[in-house]
Image (spheres, rainbow, N blue to C red):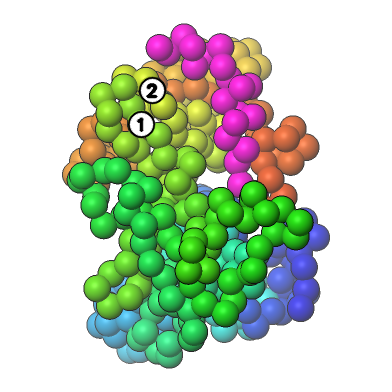
Amino acid sequence: MNLISDLTKIADECIEIKPAALLAVPRVWTKFYDRVNSQFAASPVKTMLSNKATKHAKKRIAKAGVDCDAVPPKGFRDKFFDKLIWKKVRARFGGNIRFCMSGAAALSPDIAEFIQCVGFSCYEGYGLTETSPLVCANGWMGPGGSRLRTVGRPVNGVRITIDTSAWDDPERPEEGEIIVHGPNVMQGYWNQPEATAEVMTEDGGFRTGDLGKLSADGYLSITGRVKSQFKLENGKYVSPAPLEENVKLSPLVEQAILDGRDMRNTFLIVHPNLRTLKDALGEAGIAVSGDDATLCANAEVKSWMLKRLQDTSMLAPTWKGYEVARNIILDPEEWSTDNDLMTPSLKVKLRNLLVLHEDSIAALK
C-alpha cells in the first residue's frame, strides 16, 4: 500500500508505483477528469479523436450492459481508438490499474462513466469510522452487479434503514437519514454518553447524518447531508450536494458550494478556474483588467459566469426551479486546509466559508 504524498503529483507517483488499485476522494477524480479533457481540447484533431474514442467506448459499454465495470475493446475500430487514446491515459497511471474506488463524498455519474471509458472499473463505496468503516460498496457482488449513481448494496451482515422523518420533502418522500445496523456498528463514543445517545437508536443502529434512499432491490444512493440540507424562505427543502457536484464538472469551476438557507433563492460560492475563466471571457469579448480579486468582484463577470452555469449545469428537468442558483459569489482564493476552508479529507468547511463571505451574502438578501 502506498499513500500519495502530493495530490498534484498523483500521476507521476502512479507511474513509479504502478498500482493495481487506486482509492481516492471525488476531488481527485474531478481533477483527473478536468486534466484529461483539457488535453483533449488542446487541438481540433485531439478533440475529434477523443470524441470518436469516447463514442466507441460508450457503445461497447452499453452493449455489454454493465455499470461501473471496465469492458475490454472489441473489433478493429474499438481497439484502434483504445490504443490511440485510452491506453495512453491508462499509462499515465502506471498502466497496471485493475479497478478504482471512490468514497467520502458522491462521485459525479459523468466522471464515473468517463473513468469507465478510460478502461478502469470504477466503484463507489460508503462507510464511516463508526461503522468499522465499510457499509456498502459496488464491485464486491461480481461482474454486472454494480450500479451507477449508487454506492452499491450493504456488505454481508449489514442492514440499512431510512428514517424519512429526517427529510420533510413531500416531493421526495423516499429520502431520509441513513441508519446502519450490524456487528460493524460501534458501541458508542468513549466516555461521551450524550454524544452517543444522539447518534445511536434504541435497537443499536447508527444515525449516519447522511441523506439517502434505497432502491427496491437494495442499492443505496447518497443524496446529501442532513445538516447541509436547508429550507428556503418559501418552505422548499434543498439538498445541495448533487447540484454542487454537477456545477464542479464545468471547466470554469474548481470548487463550489450551494446555499440559501432562509433566503428567497439559492446562491453559489465558486472558486473558479481562473485561467479558463479569463480565456472564456476573452472569447466572449469581455475585457477585465486588474488582479484576480478584481476579476472576481466584477459584476459583469459574475453575471456572465452565473448565466453560463445556469445554461450548462443547472438545467430543468434535472434541477427544479427553486434549486437553481440566482446569484453567485466568486472567490479568487483556493479553498484548502491552509486557510481552514477544507478538512484533511478535502471536504469544504461550510460554516467557515459562509463567515468569510458573510458581507457578500448579506448583500444578496
358 magenta-colored:
yes
Q: Which residues are magenta?
A: 346-365
Q: Is residue 279 visible?
A: no
In the rendered structure, which amino acid carries the disc numbered 1? Lys
Read off the residue under disc 1.
231
Q: Position of residue 68 (x, y in %)?
A: 41, 75
Number of callouts:
2
Q: Give the vertical position of 66 relative to 126 (above or below).
A: below
> Could you tell me which quadrant the C terminus lies in?
top left
**Label 1: which secondary element:** strand
Residue at left offset 49%, top offset 12% = 362
The quadrant holding residue 82 is bottom left
Read off the residue under disc 2.
262
Cα distance between the residues tagged 1 and 2: 6 Å
Q: Position of residue 199 (x, y in %)?
A: 55, 55
Residue at left offset 51%, top offset 37% = 256
The residue carrying pointer 2 sits among few (fewer than 14), some (14 to 19) or many (20 or more) residues within 10 Å by Cα, namely: some
Residue at left offset 49%, top offset 72% = 181
Q: Left or right of 287: which side holds 194? A: right
Q: Left or right of 356: which side holds 246? A: left
State if disc 2 and disc 1 touch (CB < 8 Å): yes
**Label 2: which secondary element:** loop
The rendered magenta stretch, by its main secondary structure, is classed as: helix
